[in-house]
Image (cartoon, helix red, strand yellow):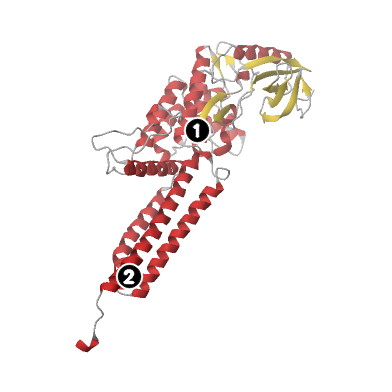
Amino acid sequence: MNSQLTAGDEFAGYRIINLIGRGGMGRVYLVDNPRLGRREALKVVSSPDSEAFTHRFLREVKTSAALDHPGIATVYHYGVDSGLPWFTMRYAPGDITARLPLRPMDVAQIVSSVASALDYAHSRQVIHRDIKPANISVGRRPDGSIDRVTVLDFGIARSADQTRLTSTGAFIGSIAYSAPESLTGGTTGPATDQYALACTAVELLTGAPPFTAANVGALMQAHITTPPERLGGRLAHLDDVLQRALSKDPGSRFRTCGEFAHALSTATGVAATRPRTPPADPTVVAQRRPDATTPAANQVVPVTTADTPDRFSRVRHALAAARASWREEHPLSDAALERRAAAAHLGNALTVVVVRPVWSVVRRTPALFGVLSAVLVVAGLIGFAAAGDVVARGTDSIPAQNYAYSSTLALQCAGLGAGAVALGVVLFALHRRYRARKPVPDDRHH
């Protein structure tokens, strides 16, 4: 029987809803379990090559079914139908690749959750052997923050003391995330999963795995012999951690996946809280939302001193924190940062060279003074319109993780608009008062 099923088909007592994944071993379907009235994920193995393969596969699925961890998709049932081995597991929606690249802080949180699940499995002598983004589900809260991370497809996992599931020369797993020892027929173990997790972390950070090649042979050779490139740039602070986890020698990697995750979280936390320039105010800006589940090292906590800032200062710092969060999600290249710095210097120069002389002329010319007031009022109205546009778009067109920044942008537009209108009115009033008091020069005295 062909393992390819379509919506509405019945297989092993389950009703197929739709195809949700595929790989070298088979296909994964979302199915309805009519007996329990719930949805599950069903994996059907494509054309097993022998009865011995089927026997070993079912034995290893049984091993995986014994795993009980909140970060592992529970294996419910398994068996053989029409000659095809299959198993069902908890359905955990949440495509991790939908928004790549991810923020370093989010990647650290995902890696920590996966590492916890893997270390649990390793403590029970079970190796996953196919860690990759497609086998990690990330559920998110309405505000876009990470809620639950689940490791999928422990169905090809094997006990560390058992023989390989594959026959001689064959290989199971995704080569783009495969450790050198698994490609050369060496001994696989917990460090093999750690290598795959590090490959996954690189892809989540950059949008691509650490090694790419035009063909499978070249890709395998790259894993075996080619040192991984350093990420550099805004991710340079993570290079040392990732380079160690991607070592060709399993013994040179971290002792456990948890150690790797802790090192990555520490490096990310240092980078996230390191200021771009020395702060003028020692008061740390603002605290993240209390419902955000970020590592403790990544949380920024306000420091209370004797000179606690007033409400206006706290709002100002909160806005600065929102801008910093947005910059973290939309990092600029070094060239872009240099252009912005150059623009700031140019603005300062224009203020001295152009703005001051122009102001000296405007304040002596009633018509220009009135035009300036009108321009400020119009600019204020444009600011109000921009704020209304941001609010009108709502959350449908604004990603959840950027909503806080978008709200801040609306407030800033409205605030600048109100300030411009108020300044225009005040300047016009002062101008009228100034002209009323200023004596008119009499040409007859000259």
Which numbered circle lies on residue 432?
2
Residue drawn at x 51%, y 24% is 114
In front of the other: 2 or 316? 316
Give above or below for 79 relative to 292. above
Residue nearest the observer in this picture, 257 or 137: 137
* 42 left or right of 64 in image: right
- The residue furthest left is 445
In this rendered view, identify the residue nearer to me: 402 or 43.
402
Query: Compared to 311, does 113 lie above or below?
Result: above
Quarter where residue 59 is shown: top right
Within 10 Å of disc 1 (Cα), the crowding (few <14, some 14-19, many 20+) is some
Q: How far apart are the alpha carbons under marks 2 and 1?
A: 54 Å
Q: Secondary structure at mark 2?
A: helix
Foreground residue among 428 and 37: 428
Counting from the top left corner in percent of width and height, residue 63 is at 61, 12
The C terminus is located in which quarter?
bottom left
Whether residue 39 is visible to the viewer of this picture, yes or no, is yes
Q: Is residue 332 above or below residue 58?
A: below
Q: Quick check: marks 2 and 1 in contact, CB under 8 Å?
A: no
Left or right of 400, for residue 320: left
Which callout, 2 or 1, points at the residue further toward the start of the chain? 1
Left/right of residue 231 with respect to residue 68 in the rendered view: left
- Residue labelled with disc 1: 145
* Residue 80 position in % (x across, y down): 74, 15
Identified by mark 2, the residue type is: Arg
Q: Residue at x 27, y 42 (%)?
A: 281
In the displayed structure, 9 sits above or below 421; it is: above
Task: Give the structural element (helix, strand or loop) at label 1.
Answer: loop
Residue type for callout 1? Ser
Label 2: few (<14), some or many (≥20) within 10 Å?
A: some
**Which label lies toward us, 2 or 1?**
2
Q: At x 44% / y 52%, what residue is drawn?
A: 414
